[in-house]
Amino acid sequence: MKAILPAALILLTIACGGVKPVKIDFHLPVLQSGDFSDAYFRQGWEQLQKGDTNAAYKFFQLSEVRLDKKQAAFGYVFLARKKYSAASSQFTQALETNPENLQAQMGMATIHEFEGDNAAAFKIYGKLLAWAQDDAWIKLRYEYIQSSATQRYLLEAEQIKNIDKAKYIRALEQAAWFSPDMTAITLQIADHYYGENEWQRSLPFYEAVLEKDAHNEVVLLKLAAIYEKKGKFDMALITLDRLLAIKPGDPVLESEKKRIRDSFQEMNLPEKFKRIFFKTEINREELAALIGYYFEPFIHMDRAPEIITDIDGSFAREYIIKTCTSGIMGTRPDHTFDRFSTPDRATFAVTLNSLINYLGKNRYTLRFTPAAARMAGADLSPLHKNYDTIAFLVNAQILPLDAENNFNPTRPVSPTDVINALKKILNNIGN
């Protein structure tokens, strides 16, 4: 009597397209040290490297690694067979299970490159490079796409410079998107829109210039004016504070700050919220208020609200519930929020990383621009429990180091720290 193949094996044979070895014409990421403890997973990876996708799939099925690792491994099996839709589905599931799965992210970047979507691949490589800046292959792919795309758009801009001004500016925008460090291009675009009274369009470009040239007084003045025109008095105040740090006591700037502060006080916001902008450090209640306020369009209540016992009477009650229910901030085991405690910069880094992961899970894509040289903070030990998260945010240029290259993990976080970091994330959603 003939043996009957199990249904799962039949489906496996169909899905993988037979037993013929395939040529692996893409980069297979190196396994992490913990992966070698599972013999089946290790053997599956070895078979995949040889191009035997059927054997690889069988070993991966038998392995007991985390679900996201197994899903990513299946993705590479389908990628080897050039079944991009199936591979993408597996990588997507892996990232939904664990947004920080580097293997799944690299797989998605590879698919995007195969499909000719270099911009999408570039976004992923930017994030990966901020996480793993010593990975030579990721660095090579990131720099290759950056260089080739920037050159292509600059050439296109030059060719139509005197023919079509609108297309010329669009080409410069594309070049600046791939190479934000080329601030001369970004400033040219910003000045163009500012001169055309298109202040909203000039805003992100001036903000991008300021990230690279923090003491540019001309840009700071223009930004303050734009924020005021758009009714963003909170940001106008912060910008004027940055100018006053450069020119302390300047009577014109002090007068401008008073005038804008009066306009800010007239806004229909809780008084306690307005006070945040004039403090030197903030508590957890105020941090939740700022995250909830700036990310209100992006944070959704998709499950039952978190039960929190100590926030009755809080001006930020709804924001606290939303940030905790979404997993961006957390509560204690006894369901208290501890709203008056002061978070330090290390704790804030963890909250920011949770915010980024929440956005990723909800299909909001972010672009990360990795620093030219790896940084983590001269005062930060690799043994620090949040070292990897802090290093990622510093290398992604979301959180800054001070003039001595220190991160100051135990220093209380200030409203300016919070708002500048949140704005950087906001400016890179969907870019």
Image (spheres, helix red, strand yellow):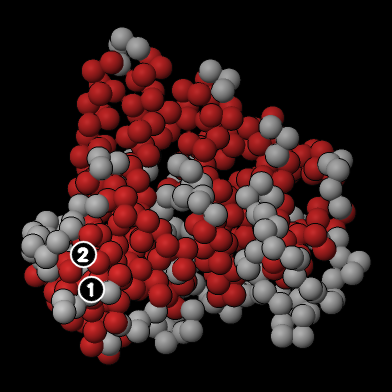
Checking the image for residue 13, the label placed there is 2
Which secondary structure, mark 1?
loop
Residue 109, above or below 56: above
Q: Nearer the viewer, residue 295 or 358?
A: 358
Q: Nearer the viewer, mark 2 or mark 1?
A: 1
Mark 2 to mark 1 CA distance (whole Å): 10 Å
Disc tally is 2
What residue do we see at 69% from left, 63% from top?
Answer: 303
Locate the C terminus and report the quarter of the image it occupies. top left
The reply, left or right, for residue 106 in relation to residue 207 is left
Residue 222 x, y percent position in the rendering? 58, 33
What residue do we see at 58% from left, 27% from top?
Answer: 199
Q: Nearer the viewer, residue 296 or 175?
A: 296
Which secondary structure, mark 2?
helix
Checking the image for residue 5, the label placed there is 1
Q: Amino acid at mark 1?
A: Leu
